Image (tube, coloured by chain):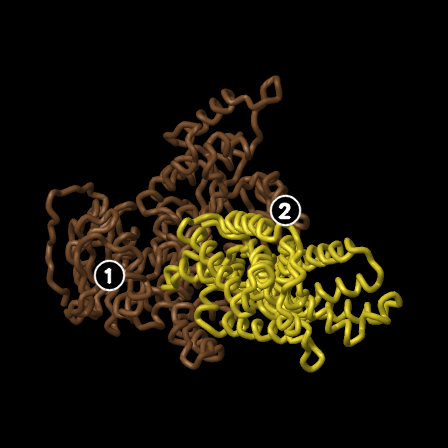
């Protein structure tokens, strides 16, 4: 089974000379540890403060309304990021999540607009189909022992093509049930409802990863699948399940996206996937440096969204946010890799 | 202490007063190493003795805080010593991980290191390369074609290729070969062949420094010995032919070592724990054996004889296609590893790094991983309880580690193995399966692990140990069975024979037509 590379700084150093580990640990100062753990959080705060006082964005950026828009529009990215965590923790990669979300979004819209389905059925079927995609991905990766990267890339292209066929390349604007759009724009305590959906999903994911045998087994599989098998972990079953879980969350994310936008385009997939993956990998540099984790992923998603919003409001062109996020990812991963290596050296 | 003229030109490698400090502790304290040209020098020491630190300083991976190194009388500048400078000085290293490209041919492995010979069109002169490599292979007693992929060689030959590659282009007089655990992953008879060849290189003038946990082997091949403990040189033996006990005494520093046979201390009650009848699976062609409560049963066999397959089949990793098993009086046919674990079976695999370790996870997680279901009683993973449990086990098994939160990879091999054994013993198994339990483990940790296994047997656990190391089976087991060509060929009480006797039995080529069993009764 081909495995994706470990998270950026999880490179396993050769065992250092025994008896010296304690000393080395002490040498990596408390400041360094603190910095490594919370660098992303501090950076996020710094970016926030910057756009709050930066003249070009200071009028529009720090308003409650703008923040609410930021969090609302980035909810989908956060959901996809959490979805991607499941296979990644188990050492596998799912490239099809953006396409699954897009499929779910267009299908739900299409079922209502073209076929006149009731809202509940138009939501249920896309989510069920998403789980089927996950079952297929998991089957290829575990039973057929195909490379997760190639498998899910192929699946993404396949879904994208079917999406284009289904929508004929058009954006579905009319015919979407107003109830779902109302849900998408509804607020509770000043924040969009969908943000609470993200928080609930994140809380469940956090619980699963840190406080269930299943989640712990995923980290073990990601660390060494052969060892995991020999301590009685059903490796194949658990890896398979991560693809199903991630696809279902992505399917739900597509519905949420529909509720936010009230419309659906077939080509939306990759625009969601890349920032989501950026959030996941940024998150892996924080809190438990070197490991994918839910809290880091959320902070990563917030970081990505406020920087995009701030840059846009400051008048930067569309390309600027991509450049900024790309650089942020390179620097964050580079720094955490460097710190990790320095920590392990004599 | 820096007297530039004191390096004796007669020494191949002269290390003096080398110190290295990590944080507050001295990993090496005023260590010296004097290697005479054309000799094999054994560098010995237990966990944390500083021998790896010394090797890493010589390889240029660590920088020494103080001290001097001279190679064939030429002082090297330790201040900015690095890997390139070490190679320049004439030091050649072959590590446990040989660094060969397994999929490429022998000749390409040579050429990637030294450069390809080129023809007039700047292409590779394959014929020339092939002839060169063929000459080298002959010189190093390797019976292989230059075009053979390294993967197809036997393990000891691969090591020899790595050695020949490290020394290529030299007659052996100007280079010092440093072998770091060259036999750690080799079966006993393979490593003997390798050591014989190394010995013959030395007789032709090659200088060799060898680091190994296998004392017996080093004793058989080395002329001189340097023994380290806690970063300090405990003794230097020149042409003294020490015994294993002499060396162990230096390494342990007065600690008693339980590497001796248990002899009459057997804890077996005579009640059968596991009965296997006509087991067929993979290379196993009808294995029958019984192991009793409190008994330590050794399974001896050459590589490929099916020892590992036997243990894995007993652990439910493979479904056997024939035979019956009974565990504690009840039928036992595990469909999965999980079921075997639920029935009280535990398995320590042979390949710690690839099949047992979670290198980038903490010691606590490495221990708890076999108990996830048991720890998850309150719908939460109880972190403090895991920590407490891990700390208890670290104390009980004398594991040298900072704490349960330390990375698994931060420990030495011996301590890693203790953690793996602790992982399984915390489950208090009824049947403990161990595959090469002390491979690549230093002598002190080995003593600890033996004590642990015996203690577990004392509490009623039935233990099966598969090992290619006859001294291990002799020291540990009550009874030894010999697995040859998928069958149990012979059975002896460990006390009946000495190590050489066991070795003779395991090497004796099968196949005798019917399994001959000396005795099938329980040991008393």
B379 in relation to B98, above or below: below
Q: Could you say which quadrant of the image residue A71 lies in?
A: bottom right
Nearer to us in this view, B372 or A314 = A314
Nearer to us in this view, B393 or B429 = B429
Residue A52 seen anywhere in this rendered image of the structure = yes
Chain containing the residue with disc 2: B
Residue B251 seen anywhere in this rendered image of the structure = no
In the picture, the quarter occupied by the N terminus of chain B is: bottom right
Chain containing the residue with disc 1: B
Colour in which chain A is shown?
yellow
The percent coordinates of residue B96 (x first, y second) are 46, 48
Indicate which disc residue B326 carries. none
Q: Please indicate whether residue B242 sits to the left or right of residue A281 in the image.
A: left
**Image chain in brown:** B
Judge the density around disc 2: few (<14), some (14-19), many (≥20) Cα neighbours within 10 Å.
Answer: some
A250 in relation to B60, above or below: below
Indicate which disc residue B82 carries. 2
Residue at image position (71%, 66%) is A303
Judge the density around disc 1: few (<14), some (14-19), many (≥20) Cα neighbours within 10 Å.
Answer: many
Indicate which disc residue B477 carries. 1
B103 in relation to B521, above or below: above
Nearer to us in this view, B413 or B93 = B413
The percent coordinates of residue B470 (x first, y second) are 27, 52
Residue at image position (51%, 21%) is B128
The percent coordinates of residue A198 (x first, y second) are 61, 71
Question: Callout 2: helix, strand or loop?
Answer: loop
Q: Which residue lies furthest to the top in this view?
A: B120
């Amino acid at each position: 089974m081909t495995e994706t590379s470990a998270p950026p700084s999880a490179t396993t150093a050769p065992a250092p000379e025994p008896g010296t580990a304690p000393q080395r640990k002490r040498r990596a100062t408390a400041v360094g540890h603190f910095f490594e753990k919370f660098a992303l959080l501090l950076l996020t705060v710094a970016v926030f403060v910057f756009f709050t006082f930066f003249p070009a964005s200071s009028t529009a950026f720090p308003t409650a309304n703008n923040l609410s828009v930021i969090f609302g529009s980035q909810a989908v990215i956060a959901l996809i990021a959490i979805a991607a965590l499941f296979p990644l923790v188990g050492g596998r990669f799912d490239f099809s999540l953006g396409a699954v979300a897009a499929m779910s979004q267009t299908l739900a819209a299409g079922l209502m607009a073209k076929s006149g389905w009731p809202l509940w059925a138009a939501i249920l079927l896309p989510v069920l189909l998403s789980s089927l995609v996950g079952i297929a991905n998991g089957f290829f990766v575990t039973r057929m022992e195909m490379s997760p990267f190639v498998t899910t890339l192929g699946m993404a292209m396949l879904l994208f093509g079917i999406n284009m066929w289904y929508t004929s390349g058009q954006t579905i604007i009319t015919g979407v049930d107003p109830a779902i759009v109302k849900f998408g724009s509804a607020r509770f305590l000043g924040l969009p409802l969908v943000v609470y959906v993200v928080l609930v999903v994140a809380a469940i994911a956090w619980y699963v990863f840190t406080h269930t045998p299943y989640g712990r087994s995923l980290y073990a599989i990601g660390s060494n699948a052969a060892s995991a098998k020999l301590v009685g972990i059903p490796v194949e079953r658990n890896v398979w399940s991560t693809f199903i879980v991630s696809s279902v969350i992505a399917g739900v994310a597509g519905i949420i996206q529909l509720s936010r936008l009230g419309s659906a385009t077939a080509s939306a997939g990759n625009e969601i996937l890349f920032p989501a993956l950026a959030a996941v990998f940024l998150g892996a540099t924080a809190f438990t440096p070197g490991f994918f984790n839910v809290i880091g992923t959320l902070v990563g998603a917030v970081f990505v969204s406020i920087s995009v919003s701030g840059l846009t409001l400051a008048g930067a062109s569309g390309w600027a946010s991509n450049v900024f996020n790309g650089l942020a990812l390179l620097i964050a991963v580079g720094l955490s890799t460097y710190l990790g290596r320095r920590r392990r050296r004599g | 202490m820096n007297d530039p003229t004191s390096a004796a030109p007669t020494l191949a490698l002269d290390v003096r007063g080398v110190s290295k400090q990590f944080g507050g502790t001295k990993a090496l304290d005023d260590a010296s190493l004097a290697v005479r040209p054309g000799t094999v020098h054994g560098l010995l020491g237990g966990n944390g003795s500083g021998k790896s630190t010394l090797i890493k300083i010589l390889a240029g991976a660590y920088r020494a805080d103080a001290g001097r190194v001279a190679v064939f009388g030429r002082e090297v500048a330790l201040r900015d010593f690095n890997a390139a400078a070490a190679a320049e000085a004439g030091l050649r290293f072959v590590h446990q991980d040989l660094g060969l490209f397994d999929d490429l041919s022998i000749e390409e492995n040579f050429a990637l290191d030294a450069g390809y010979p080129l023809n007039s069109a700047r292409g590779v002169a394959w014929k020339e390369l092939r002839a060169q490599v063929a000459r080298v292979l002959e010189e190093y007693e390797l019976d292989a074609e230059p075009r053979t992929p390294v993967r197809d060689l036997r393990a000891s030959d691969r090591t020899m290729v790595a050695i020949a590659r490290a020394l290529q282009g030299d007659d052996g007089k100007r280079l010092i070969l440093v072998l770091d655990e060259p036999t750690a992953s080799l079966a006993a008879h393979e490593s003997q062949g390798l050591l014989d060849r190394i010995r013959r290189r030395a007789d032709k003038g090659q200088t060799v420094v060898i680091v190994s946990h296998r004392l017996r082997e080093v004793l058989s091949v080395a002329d001189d010995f340097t023994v380290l403990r806690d970063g300090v040189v405990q003794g230097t033996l020149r042409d003294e032919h020490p015994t294993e006990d002499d060396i162990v005494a230096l390494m342990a520093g007065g600690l008693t070592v339980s590497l001796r046979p248990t002899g009459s201390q057997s804890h077996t009650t005579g009640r059968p724990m596991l009965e296997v009848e006509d087991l067929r699976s993979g290379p196993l062609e009808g294995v029958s054996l019984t192991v009793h409560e409190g008994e330590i049963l050794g399974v001896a066999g050459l590589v490929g004889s099916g020892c590992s397959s036997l243990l894995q089949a007993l652990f439910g990793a493979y479904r056997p296609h024939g035979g019956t098993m009974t565990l504690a009086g009840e039928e036992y046919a595990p469909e999965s590893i999980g079921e075997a674990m639920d029935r009280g079976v535990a398995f320590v695999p042979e390949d710690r790094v690839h099949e047992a370790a979670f290198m980038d996870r903490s010691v606590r997680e490495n221990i708890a991983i076999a108990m996830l279901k048991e720890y998850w009683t309150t719908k939460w993973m109880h972190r403090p309880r895991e920590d407490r449990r891990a700390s208890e086990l670290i104390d009980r098994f004398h594991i040298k580690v900072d704490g349960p939160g330390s990375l698994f990879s931060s420990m030495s091999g011996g301590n890693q193995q203790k953690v793996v054994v602790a992982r399984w013993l915390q489950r208090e198994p009824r049947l403990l399966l161990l595959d090469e339990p002390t491979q690549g483990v230093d002598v002190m940790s080995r003593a600890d692990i033996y004590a642990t296994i015996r203690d577990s047997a004392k509490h009623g656990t039935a233990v099966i140990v598969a090992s290619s190391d006859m001294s291990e089976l002799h020291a540990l087991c009550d009874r030894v069975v010999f697995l040859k060509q998928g069958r149990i060929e012979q059975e002896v009480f460990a006390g009946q024979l000495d190590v050489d006797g066991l070795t003779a039995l395991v090497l004796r080529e099968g196949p005798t037509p019917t399994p001959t069993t000396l005795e099938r009764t329980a040991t008393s």
